Image (cartoon, helix red, strand yellow):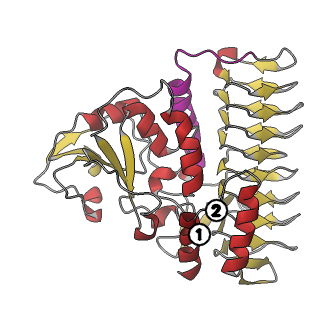
Amino acid sequence: MPSTFTADFNQWTIGILAPPIPQSMSIILSDAGLHSHLLPLTYTRPVGQLRPGILRISEGWYVRSGLSVGHRTEAYLTAAFPVPLEPANWEVDGSLFPTDQLVSAVMDLRPGDVLVHEGRALAFGAEGKGHPAVGDWAAPPSYLRNVPFSGEVIRFERPWHLFQLCGKAIAHDFALLTEGRRSQRIESSNTVIGDPNLVFLEEGALVEASILNTKNGPIYIGKGAEVMEGCMLRGPIVIGDHAQVKMGAKIYGPSAFGPECRVGGEVSNSVIFGYSNKGHDGFLGNSVLGEWCNLGADTNTSNLKNTYGNVQVWGGAENAMVDTGMQFCGLLMGDHSKSGINTMFNTGTVVGVAANVFGGGFPPKHIPGFSWGGATGFETYDIERALTTARRVMERRNIPLTALDEAILRHIAAA
């Protein structure tokens, strides 16, 4: 949501990470026709605000380029996520992870250029006040000068791509944010398996009496975060600023937990954007949770069908079930949704924004936003009650529900 974007984007805008670039230059991250493909995660944010690793995509573009970054997105989101005040120099597919090579190639584009990979546009050199049409991303106009890109392309076109590609995002962000810097000291009560240089603790991070395994990738512990005693972390893993990993937790990477998350029990290959809680025993696997979610004690997700077949999930663009092409896919949950104790989510369950799920048995695999109930049925969660709950939840992290936040939630509820 917009308020949390402002709160933790600032930690990267202050300091030495961003190179000095004239602020008259800017980048626009376009949804590029993918907004509905990434529901329910994009109900409350543009595509470029997804967080696959340590940083949001937009933060990654800012830190690597030093340019102001804005969004071209759905009309109801534009007040909270506007385009830059400065004329844009480049318009980029917001689903692209900003590798160093891609950022360099984009910034080399001239007006009238289009950066192309496998027939699809990655970025346009901006010309005047015009901007690419949605169809231009899939089929770049022939009158533009094609600039081929042969480097690595990491694109998040579906919600499950976030946990699938999380490991790559962590590796790139870890290298970016730790280069030339020294980690805080790792307490001797911990056991490090693998390269200790792949464990990085930011200022105020606390890790005690835990096992940290970096053989498969790095472990990044954010500012003021805490990993309590008895935890077992197998990288690549991100623990965001002021997040907590509860005692005895078992975390299998690649996994990334954003700021202020509370994580416990068993988690495997999952992404939690921030300010969300999975603080108790129970299994979460191959899943993505938005912000301000809470999973009640002993909530469990199935991430594998008994038939070992491909998992189907509800697709926002199709408004129907789609084949993920994967054997493993758990829970995809939008912002502000909650589950009661002992909730069981079936393989490939999709939950919208501000849903409240509880009770025995397996609820449906697609639970629309603002639903209240469980396996025995649902009723509509009244918007006023939902907003009251959201205010209470956000106040516990000393973050207000802003007028922009409220307008977005009201739009979603009315849609």
Q: What element carries label 2?
A: loop
Q: Where is residue 361 in the image (x, y as percent from the top left)?
A: 85, 73
Q: Give the range drawn in magenta.
A: 162-185
Given residues 129 and 235, the one toward you in this image is 129
Residue type indicated by callout 1: Glu
Counting residues from the start of the chain, the first of labels 1 and 2 encountered is 2
> From the viewer's perspective, is 328 left or right of 361?
left
> From the viewer's perspective, is 35 left or right of 142?
right
Q: Where is residue 326 in the image (x, y as percent from the top left)?
A: 59, 55
User: Residue at coordinates 64% horizontally, 76% vertically from top-left?
Assistant: 368
What residue is disc 2 on? 401
Q: Position of residue 414 (x, y in %)?
A: 56, 82
Judge the density around disc 1: few (<14), some (14-19), many (≥20) Cα neighbours within 10 Å.
some
> From the viewer's perspective, is 280 left or right of 409?
right
What residue is disc 1 on? 406
Residue 155 visible? The answer is yes
